Amino acid sequence: MRAWIPGMRDSAIEGLSTLARRPDWRCADDGEIIRARVLDALNDENPVVRMNAAEAFNALYIDLDAADRAQKAGDRLMGEQDATVQTVLLKAVASEMDAAPQSVDDVLKNFITGSATSTGAEDDGDEQRGLVVDVLTILAVTKGTPFAASSINQWFASAPQFGTESLRAIQRLRNYIAPQAEPELQARAFELLATAADEALVVLTRRASEQYNRADSSAAETAETEDALRIMDGIADQIYFASGAFQKDHGGQGKLGPSHESFALRAVPVLSTCAHSGVAMVLHQVVETLIYLGPLNEKRALVAIAGAVGDNMSYAGESLAGNLVIPYLKRLLAEHRELVLFDDEGVAAFRHLLSAFATAGNESALEMAFTFADVFR
Amino acid sequence: LSKPVLQFLLGRVPEAGTGERQVDPDRDAIVLCTDPAAPATVRIQLASAVQRVASQPPGTGFGTELTKPQHAALKIALDHVRRAWKAANQSEPSNEDLRSFFRTLRVLTLDLEEGRSDQQAALTALHRALPDNSRAPTAWTVLGAEGHASAETREWRDRPMLGVALSRKDVALAAPKMHAADVTVLRERSAANLRKMQAEARLPVVAGGLYISRSVSEKLRTATSRENVLIIGDAGSGKSAVAQDLATSRSTEEVVVLLARDLVGINQLRTNAPIQEVFRAWAGPPGLIAIDGVDALRGSDDRETLSCIVSALAGTRWQVVATARTFDTRYSQPLRRAFPGSPLTQVPNMFDERLADVRHLLVSDLTDDELDRAITAPMTLASVIAEASPDLRTLLRNPFNLRLAADLSDGLTSGQRAELLQVRSRVELLRHYWDRRIRSHDRLAREALLTRLSVDMVKRRSLQTAEEEPTVVGTDSTALEDLLSQNVLSALDGAIQGVGRVLAFTHNILFDYAAAIYVLYHPTDLGGLTGQLDADPTLPLVARPSFDLLVDMLWDKRSAGHFWPRVLLVAGSQHDLASLAIASRIANLVRAADDLLELAPKSGEANTETALLPRQKLAGQIIGAVRAQTVVPSMSSAVLPLATLAHRLASNASNASNASYSHADAALAVDVTRALQGRIPIADEDPPQPGRDERANVIAALLDGCRSDPRKMEHIAGAAARQLKYVIGFSPEVRQSVRRLIDDQPALKQWGGTVLTWFPEAAAAALNQDPQLARILATVATTFEEERDEQVSFGGSAIVGMNESRKQQAGRAVHELGEIFFDFCERDIITSTEIVCDLLTDDDQPPEPYKWPITAHGRTGYIENGYGLSLRPHTNEDEQKMLTALSTALLTASAEDADEAVGILVDRMHSAFGWAALIDQPSDPAGLGRILFAGLESGAMLAHPDTFPRAAALLVAVVKSGGAPAAQIEAAVRNAIELAGRSGAGDYVKSVLVGCLGNSEVSDSELARRREGLGDSAPEIPTPLSIQSDSTPWSVVDHLQTQGIGLSDEVESTARTLACAINEAQSGSATPDAVDGLITAFMAATEVFAEAQALHPRLELLLVSAAARLAHVATARPDSPHGTRVLRVLNDAAEHPDAGLFSR
C-alpha cells in the first residue's frame, strides 16, 4: 500500500468512514448525516479521501443484497483511476465472495479484462494483483466460477510463464490441501499443484538439456527458470506446512490422523515431481514431508524418498540431509524389518538410500552399512 | 451411606485393557462395614432389609415382605440414599436405580479383634494361600496395613501388589491355583534353558568343560539394585554366559530362565493365561527372570510385545535381565523403553556411551588377566596362549575365537601346533578349523553340503534352513551327521517335535566364513563376485561379515595378484555398497607405506573429469571409512599408507608438467588429509608420528599444483590452506610452497579469502621456525585488497543456502588475526610489532609528515595529523584488538625486546589511530608509560589531538610512580607544549600538560611559571573526544518551532500532550490507559484550541487525527460526550479544502 501524507478532509473522512461502519453510529440520529458525508466523499476529487471513504463501502450499502453490493462496488471500481482506491474497492468486492461468488467473478472479469492504466499502479500493483489472485484462487477452488477457474487453469498450465500469479496462488492453496480440508476441494487444489509442478519440471528439464548446448541464455529464459524453481520450492513448502510436519519438527503435536491418508495419496506424487528439480532446498522439504507421512504407509514413503534422493550426491552429502534420512532408515530397520529386509521394492529403496548417503561420506550411513548384517544374527 | 452412593454413581473400577469401568452390581460389591458395637438396626435389620430388597424382582414395592424393624431401618436408609443420590446426580433415583444400588451394597459386621471369630476365620482362610501357615498372623497384619493404606490413599491393590507387600515381610504366597499349571511349564522350560546355557558357557579345554569367571559377570552379580538390566554386546562376546552366571548365582531365589522366543513368536510357550499375567500373579519374595536372545526376535511387533511384558512386570517381585546385541539395542525403541535408566556401571568396556538412557551392561572381549587366570597348565591351550604372538593373543580374547582355538588345541601334533601359533587373524583361525573339522575327511561331500546350506541361508536371509531337498539330499546323510557331531552344524526341532529338523551353523561366525568361501568367492572368475552382486545387490548388507572375511583372505594373497583386480572391478560396478564394504575392510588391513599405491595415478592413465575412475572411487570410499570410528576403530596403522597415497594423488594436481592432471585426484588428496586430521591430529612431537612428513608433503604438493590452474582448483587450494596450520611449523617443504604461493600474484588474486582466511593461523604456527614468513603471511592476509564483489558460499550448505561476498570473505583474515594476536605478541613481540606496522602503514606520505615528529631509541618517525576522533568504538575493532594485545605484551616483554618494539613503532607506525589504540586503557599505565617514555619525551604523543588525553594519563602515571627522571619528564612536557603551540592548540591543552607534572619540583622556569599560573586548580585530563547523541520523539510542535512559529504555553503543552497521546494509542494493542489518555487529551484540546487565536492548520489536523483515531474507540458512542465531540470535529473538517496526497 502506498504511503500518503494526511490532510484535513481525508482525515475527517477516515474518522467518519470508521463511524459509518459501526452499527451504533449507523442507527444513531446522526447516522444519515455520516452516511451522506461518506457517500459524497466517494466522489471526492482527492484519491486519499476516496480511499478512506471506500473503506466503508459495504457499510454504506448494507441494505442491498450481496450480489447488488458487489456489482455496485464493481461499477465504482471500473470508474476509479487510482490504484490504491481500486484496491480498497476490490477488498469490498472480495468480502462478498461467499455470498455472491458469481457477481464477484463477473466484477473481477470486467476489471481484469477492461482495466486501463491507473495512477499509482507501480506502487500498489503488487498488493492489488495479489488480492485479485487470492480471490480468484479461492473462487476457483471453492465455487468453480467460470472466470476464476479459467484464470487459475491458465496460470497453472503455464506456471513458469505466470510466475508471480502462480506463486501467490500456490500459497493460497495451502488451506485447501490440508488434511482436514474438504475432500473435493483438496482434490481440486492438488490437481492444480500437480499441473504447476509438472510444468515447472518441463521448463527445468528443458533448460538443463539446453545448458549443454548453449553457454548463454536470455534474461527471459533465466527468469523463467528461476520462477520454475520458485514454483517447485513453493509447492514443496506449502505441502510441508499443510501436512503438519512443521509442527512435529518444532515440538508441536503434528499427529497423523485418518484424514492424512487421502492427503498423502495426493501429496506424494506432487512431492516426487518437485524432488526432480534436484535442488537441495526443495528436496529437503520433500523428504521431510515424506518421512513425516511415512507411518501411514511406510513402503510408499520409502520408495518415494529413494526416488526423490535418486543419485543426488550433493544432497546426500549434506549433513542436514544425513541427519534426517539416516535416523529414518534406522527406525525402519528397527520397526519395519519386513519392509527393508524382505520386500523387494522396500529393500531396493533402502539399499539405494543407504548407498547414496554412505557413498557421499555420511558417517552414520557408513556405520549403518558396516553393521547392517547384525540384523540377521 | 453417602459414600457408598457416590462410589456407586461415580466410582471407577480399574480393568485390564480398557483401563477402567463403572461399578457393576453383577460383579462388584460396595461394603458397608461395621463391628459388633454397632446398633442392631444397622447390623441386623438394615443388612437383612438391603439383602431382601436387592433380591426382589423389578417392580416390587419397597417394604414388601419386610418386618417392621427392617422396614424402619430401610426407610431411614432410603432417605439418606435418595438425598445423597440427588446431590450427586442432580436427579431423583427411581426405585429400580435404588434396587441396583442395594444389589451392590453389602452390610457386613466383622468381629476382628485379636482371637475373635472373624479374625480367626481370616487366618484360617490365609492358610490356603500360604505355603508356610506359621506366617499367617504376619500376613494378616500386612494385609490389614495395606488395606488401611489403600483406603486412605484411595488406591487399588491387586494380588501381585499384595504379594510384593507380603514378600517384604518374608511372607511367601503359594502359586495361585489357576496359574499352577502355567508355573510348572515355566519352571520346566527354565530348567532346560539354564542347563543348556550352562553347558554352552563351558570351554572344552578340560573334562567337563571350563567356565571362565569374568569381571563383567561379577559386576552384575554384585549389583545391589534390583532394577531391570539389559546385557549387551557383539555376537560371540559371551552375553548368554553372563546371563547364565547371574541365574546360577541366584540359587536362593526363584529364577526363571527363558529364551526370548519362549515369550513371543510362533514357538512361544503355550500357557493358559498370558505370560505376564502368570508372572504378576506368581507372587512371593524377590525373583529373577533372565531372557536370553532378545535380538533373535525379528518382527517389530514381537519386540513391542516383549517390551510390554517387561513393562507389565514393573512393581512385581521380578527383576528382568535380558541379553541383546548392541546393534539391536541401539536401534530398537521398544527395547530401550523396556530398560530405562542409566548404565549399570561406568567401568570402561562395560558400558556403551551411546546408550546413556538404557540400564545396561556391556560385555566385551575377555581381559588378558581373565584369560591368564582361566587357561592354565596343564591345558594344551595354555601353552598355546603362553607362546602366542600379540596378534594371536588379542584374537583369543574373543570368546568365540577362544572356543575355536580350544577345539583345535585338542590333540595337536607339533606341526599343527606350530601352524596354530602362526595364526594372526580370524580367517586364519577359521581356515585351520575348517581344515581340521571339515576338510579332514570326506571333503567334497561335506563342502558340497555346506555350500548348499550357505547359499540357501543367504538367499533366504536366515541363519537356519530346513533339512529338506533340494538343500539337503539323501546322499548327504553321512556328511551331515559328521558335521553335526563335529559341532559345525546344529539341528533344532521345528514347531512339531521330531518332525522337520532345522539346520544351523553352531555359531554365526562359522556361517560368515562358509558364506565367504562358498558364496562370495569365485576362485577362477575375477568377475564372479560382480556377477553375484548383479543377481543379489543386497548381499553387501546381509552378508557383510562374509565380505570382510573374503577381503581378509584375498588381501593376504594380494602379492599374487588376486586382490586388486577383483576389488577394482567391484569399485567400477554399480555396487557401491559392496565396494564400500571392501573399502572399509581395506582401511583396517593396510599397514605398509605402499599398501595403497595401486590406487595412485598411473602413468599414461586416461584422465576423465566427468566420472571417477574405479581406483578413485575406491580411494574415496576408503577415505569415507576412515572418517567413521566404528568402521575403522584403530587408525594408527593406516596413517602411513594413506598419507603416501595422498602424496601421489596430490602430485597429480598440477597441469604444469602433467598432461593428465586431475582435479579428482587432488580432491581425494585433500580428503585424505582431512580425514587423517580428524582421526589422528598431527602433533609436533619427537620422534615424529608415522606419515607426518608425508601428510605435510601432500599440502605442499597441493598448494604448488593448484597454482597451475587457480580458477579450477580454488576450492582445493582453500581446503589445503586450511590445513597449513598443522604442518607449516615442522615442514620446510610446506614453508617453501607457501613462499612460492605468496609470490604468485595471479593465484592469490583468484583465491582471495578462500585461502587468506587461513593464513593468520598458519602464521602463528610458523612463527617460531620462520618469523619472517609468519610476518609475510599475516601481512598478506590482512592487507589484501579484494576488488570483486561476487557472492561465494558461506558455510557450504545447499539446503540452507548462505552466501557472503568475496570482500566479506577476505575480511575474515583480519578478524582471525585479531583473535589470535595476543598469543602472537607473547611469542614474538618484534615480529608482531612489524605486523601491526605493516597493517597500519599507508604507502602515501602525508603532506606534513613531520608536524608531529617522534623519536625513540635512535629511531625517528612521525604521527599523521588527526582531529581527536581517530579511535572510536566499533571502528577498526580487529586492529584495536591487535594493538591492545601488543600493548599488553609490551608490559611483559624483556627490556631489550620492548625497546626494539617501540623503536619499530616510532619508525614505522604513523597512524594516529594506531598510537591512540596502543595507549588506550592499559592495564598498567605506569608500566606502559615507562616503556613508551622515550616516545612520550618527543612530545608528539602528548600534544597530538588523537593521543593527547591518553598520553597525558600515561605521563601522570609515570610521574606518580617515579618512572622517569624529572628532567626528562619536564622535557617531554616542554616539547609537547611547543608542538601544541605550533599546531594552534589553546592554553587548555598546555595547562593540562603542565598539570601532569603534579606537585613535583620543576626546574624549568617556563614550566614553573605556567604551573604557578594554574594555582591550585590545574585542569583535569579530559576524556578522549567521542561523539554522543540522544533523541526525543518529534512532534508537530517541534516542526512548528523549527519554522519559527510561536505558540502560547497552554497551546504548546496541550498540543504536545495530544500528539503524545495519539502516538501511544495508535498501535492496535493500545492499552485502556492509553485510550483514556487520548480521550482526555482530545477533550482538553478541543477547548484550548477553540480559545486560541488563529490556530495553526497543523494543530487543527492534529485534532482531526485524534478524532479519527477515537472513532475506533468503542466508548466513543453517539450518546457519549466525547463521541459527540468526535463527530463534531470530523463533520467540521469534512469539507475542509485541505486534503492529503499519496507520497508518489
Image: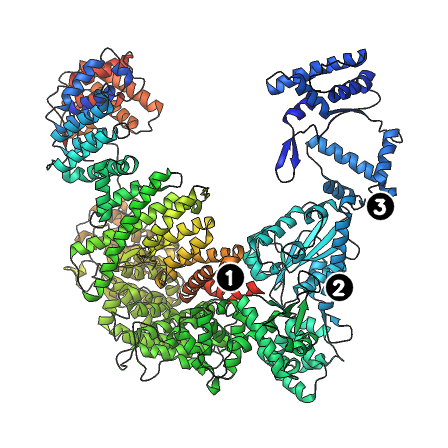
Cα distance in 3D space between marks 2 and 1: 34 Å
Which residue is the site of mark 1?
Answer: A341
Image spot of residue B1075 (x, y percent): 31, 22
| Quarter placement of the C terminus of chain A | bottom right
Residue picked out by circle 2: B195
Can I make out residue B1052 in this image? no
Q: Position of residue B1049 (x, y in %)?
A: 21, 20
Under circle 2, the secondary element is helix
The amino acid on which the numbered mark 3 sits, given as a three-letter code, is: Pro
Sequence order check: which comes first, mark 3 or mark 2? 3
* Tag shown at residue B131: 3
Pair 3/1: label in front: 1
Cα separation, mark 3 vs mark 1, equals 51 Å
> Label 2: how many residues lie within 10 Å, few (<14), some (14-19) or many (20+)?
some
Do the residues under discs 2 and 1 have CB atoms within 8 angstroms? no
Disc 1 chain ID:
A
Horizontally, is A273 left or right of B33 in the view?
left
- Frontmost residue, B754 versus B119: B119
Q: Amino acid at mark 1?
A: Leu
CB-based contact (under 8 Å), mark 3 and mark 1:
no
Residue A281 figure quarter:
bottom left
Judging from the image, mark 3 belongs to the subunit labelled B
Question: B718 or B353, which is in the foreground?
Answer: B353
Report the mark closest to the observer, 2 or 1.
1
Residue B518 at least partly seen: yes
Of residues A43 and B129, which is closer to you in this image? Answer: B129
The chain letter under disc 2 is B
- Badge 1 density bin: few <14, some 14–19, many ≥20, Cα 10 Å: many
